[in-house]
Amino acid sequence: MSSKKRNFEFWWKEKALFKFFLFITFLISVIIFSCQDGVKKDKPIRIAVASFSHETCTFCPRPTTIKDWEFFGKPTKDFLDSDRDYIGGFKTMCEEFGGIELVPLTSPRSSRGGSSGSWNTQEVFDKYTNIFCEELKNAGTLDGVFLSLHGAMAVTGIPKPEAEIVRKVRKVVGDIPIMVTLDLHGNVDHELSDAADAVFIVKRYPHYDTTLQGERCARVMINTIRGNYKPTMATRKPGIITPSVFQGTGVSPAMDIMERARRWECRIKDVYVSVAFGFAYADVPDVGATVMVVTNNDQELADKIANDMSDYIWRVRKEFAGKKLPKTREGVALAIKAVKDGKIPVVIADHSDRTGGSSQILEELISQVAKDFCITTLRDEKAIQKILANHKVGDKISIDVGGYSDKFAGNPVHIEGKITFIGEYRRDASVVIKFGENNFVILTEHLMQITDTNIFKPLGINLESLEIIVLKSRVHFRRGYHETGFAGAIIEVDAPGWGPADLATLDYKNIPRDIYPVYRND
């Protein structure tokens, strides 16, 4: 055989071996890819979704019962239609990924009265968490669980409810990702981050970014299930407690704290930095600010960021938690002065009234001869029932309103005027009484936090005729009154109530004994 022919045969064999090697390499790559991700594309990822959210003012007198939770209807699975809020954002992101099946668990609706309800009964907690667990047992194979919680739920006999919810779910589903979204007011600590794989908290108050946090949670959840992300958490408690009225993220230092968190997220890929400012009106052991950081398998980085955020919050503690607000008489006087200075309309934020029936600002407005004002709104179910039984629109009326909902409610205030509206607003029986030349009080059956100006037109009140608007709201009202440029001035009044700016006035029994500024003044 010639050398030329031998060289050709050798070359052909070598090339055939090379082709065979390439084919085997390609086959192995396909198999590995299929094992890691391809199987998930053939078989939908299944994620259970549930919601159980309550902000509990434990100082309020009335406990929160099953009747309150089911006032607006029985628990439901029908909560996946919206593309807003935490669950809406989670759903939208899952749709973008594709191949995701969401399994809704029967969940309670909103509780009547919101945070005006005190301790949830253990019956409440057991009923809904047991529903979750039973449905999870019968849900078939699941790849993850998403829980839309609040963080400031308080339950009689259960010190840390959100962590306990996750632990109960974990016992049923085992070692699959469980991820949680929380409100900015969460009172949580390491027990929650020990039980859950990742926690995501809104950064804005008012809470514009609930949908965004739901989207983030879904992205991390799906990447974790597919093996592309390993959530690693660090949690810190800076040791400060702040009233809700100081937590608006449009002003410093709350704004600076959240901006610092966003800077960390922008600088480093796959990092999520959450801060819960806490809910001061829950007398629970994990009250106060919390930092929770999620990284992709980098504990050292998570600890570094958590330490930085916690240290910064401590450094600005005096500006964040040590401010003082005017009391009722001074606050009303400031509002009247602002009117005279042409800064109309003036909004008075009665932020501390957690039960909705405090009459003290109304009484002071009358005493200081304010005009063209509206109390939006005053809870008085007794007056409403009396009016519904004996009066109609157009009737003149002489009646006492407010002043009995709790020990801070003040005295009933006597007004003589005309009924201009009887009906419903937000499914609450409502009555409007006009008195004086152009003063109004809107009566509702329950505490109603008004966050925009939409209430006035359907109730027949000419918004442009008002000089002073009193809102029983902490910060959420700013979206409709401050950010729109509508209010000429805003006066936050520290009137008596279960939600005061001066936290030293509250009779705490369960909070940490070294928390600033209640027990520390350094």
Image: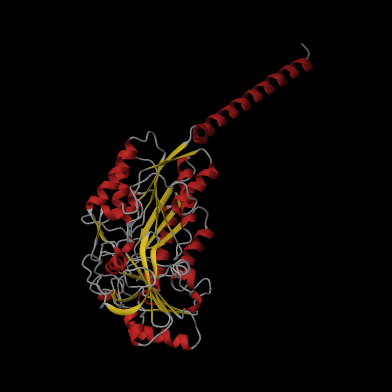
Q: Is residue 398 above or below residue 213?
A: below
- The reply to whether residue 314 is in sight is no
Observer-nearest of 196 and 500: 500
- Residue at 25% x, 48% y: name it: 126
Observer-nearest of 188 and 266: 188
- Residue at 53% x, 40% y: name it: 98
Q: Quadrant of the C terminus?
A: bottom left
Q: Position of residue 104 (x, y in %)?
A: 40, 42
- Tell me if 41 is positioned left or right of 329 in this view: right
Q: Quadrant of the N terminus?
A: top right
The way the protein has been coloured in the rendering is: secondary structure
Q: Quadrant of residue 441?
A: bottom left
Q: Is residue 204 above or below residue 168?
A: below
Counting labels gives: 0
Q: Position of residue 195 (x, y in %)?
A: 33, 49
Q: Is residue 417 above or below residue 158?
A: below
Q: Quadrant of residue 374?
A: bottom left
Observer-nearest of 484 and 15: 484
- Residue at 44% x, 56% y: name it: 301
- Tell me if 273 is positioned left or right of 19 in this view: left
Observer-nearest of 295 and 155: 155
Q: Position of residue 156 (x, y in %)?
A: 22, 57
Q: Position of residue 243 (x, y in %)?
A: 34, 71
- The reply to whether residue 418 is in sight is yes
